[in-house]
Image (spheres, rainbow, N blue to C red):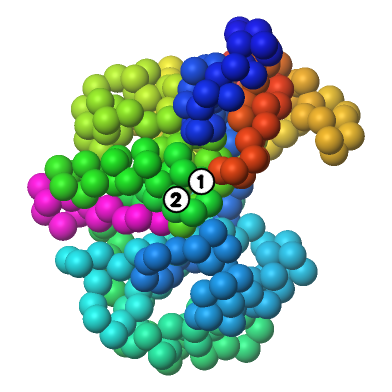
Amino acid sequence: MQTQQTDQLSLANCRFCSLISKANQEDPIGTAGTCDHWLIMEIPQPWPQEIFQENPTIKALINDFQKVIVKHGINLRPILIAPDREYSYPGFTRVLYYYRPAKLFSQFEKQEFVVPQEEANALVTAIMKQLIQQPNDLSKFQHYQQQTSHIRELMVCTHGQVDIACGKFGTSIYRRLRKEYAPVSNGKLRIWQTTHFGGHQFAPTLVDLPQGCLWGHLEPEVLDLLVNRNDSVLGLRQFYRGWTGLTKFEQIAEREIWMQLGWTWLDYLKSGEVLAKEEMNEEHDPNWANVRIGFAASDGSTSGAYEARVEVCGEVMSALGSKKEMELEAVKQYCVSHLIKVE
């Protein structure tokens, strides 16, 4: 671990929080956040830093978002994507809605709509009303629905107005994926630019849907493995932020299981539970947690569970804050000290 004096020097000489995080070997696992619903909407660039407050289309939806997320406590993650010259249609807006289909699941279910621009907000409002079980007119948009459940969507944060690292490194990764991987996918893979979805210190960051995995600190040489899954999963360990179907400590345990079982683990239906954790105040993360990860084959042929002990195994200094005002902060690093299959 580098000394704080060395870290302060690196901060003074570096504009990019992600480079400091990577140099100090910050492990991104457990930072994916937990999500039950994704609501993704096409909005043309440029994107200002406070696009959710400044863009007139999105600003009109803010009260609905706050009602769903804050008042009703629904784990909804809104993201904006840039229209694409090949995928998108002038005068129309694409809206992607992903949702957790059950407690035990392997990937999110998807609904996609391409609607006239003037109807986009009404569609988004109808989806959010459905989430809180209010009367809605979602049925009237059925004829705009697209049959795209077979398409994998890789979404790269390029929102440079929020963090310059996302703009610089995210754009480079996006262009490579868009140029080299999407065209040879036979229509089964689309690549998008997105607004910020958290974890800028891990730029370049990526969301993989419908799986719901988040990635960070991506390097060009790991893209082939991430997209094609053609070698050992161990090569992705240091880039994995976690699966959004689980909470923080569950994500840390889940990675350990995945690294042991390999690619087949992604096909299992999964759920998580924190059995116990150290009691701490809200300002400090616990030093340990005991978690349980349940799993089942989609055809019902097998099921079981793992139990794991997750513990602090060190800390690193990471650069947090905005693109203009970064500050160093000690971040706890966790490892799985015990993992056993119990069923």
Image disc number at residue 298: none
User: Quick check: 41 above or below 125?
Assistant: above
Residue farthest front in this picture: 13
Q: Is residue 22 left or right of residue 339?
A: left
Looking at the rendered structure, the secondary structure element under dot 2 is: loop
Q: Residues within 10 Å of mark 1 (few under 14, many from 20)?
A: many
Residue 269 position within the rendered picture, expressed as x and y whole percent measured from the top left: 47, 42
Percent position (x, y) of residue 307? 64, 23
Quadrant assignment, res 249: top right
Residue 340, horizontal then vertical, whole percent: 59, 16
Three-letter amino acid code of the residue under disc 1: Asp
**Within-10-Å neighbours for mark 2: few <14, some 14–19, many 20+:** many
Foreground residue, 128 or 83?
83
Answer above or below: position of 95 versus 305: below
Q: Can the viewer see residue 250? A: no
Q: Which of 292 and 15 is in front in this view?
A: 15
* Residue 283, image quadrant: top right
- Residue at 65%, 8% in the rendered image: 3
Residue 289 lies, with reference to residue 152, above or below; the image says above
Whether residues under marks 2 and 1 lie with C-beta atoms below 8 angstroms apart, the answer is yes
Q: Examine the structure image and report whether residue 191 is included in the region drawn in magenta.
A: yes
Would you identify the image quadrant in which residue 259 lies? top left
Q: Is mark 1 on a helix, strand or loop?
A: loop
Residue occupying the point 29% across, 41% down? 172
Which numbered disc covers residue 160?
Answer: 2
Range of the magenta residues?
182-194
User: Residue visible at 15% across and 43% down?
Assistant: 180
- Which three-letter amino acid code belongs to the residue tagged 2? Gly
Tell me the residue that label 1 is attached to. Answer: 163
Q: How far apart are marks 2 and 1 (CA)?
A: 5 Å
Membership of 65 in magenta stretch: no
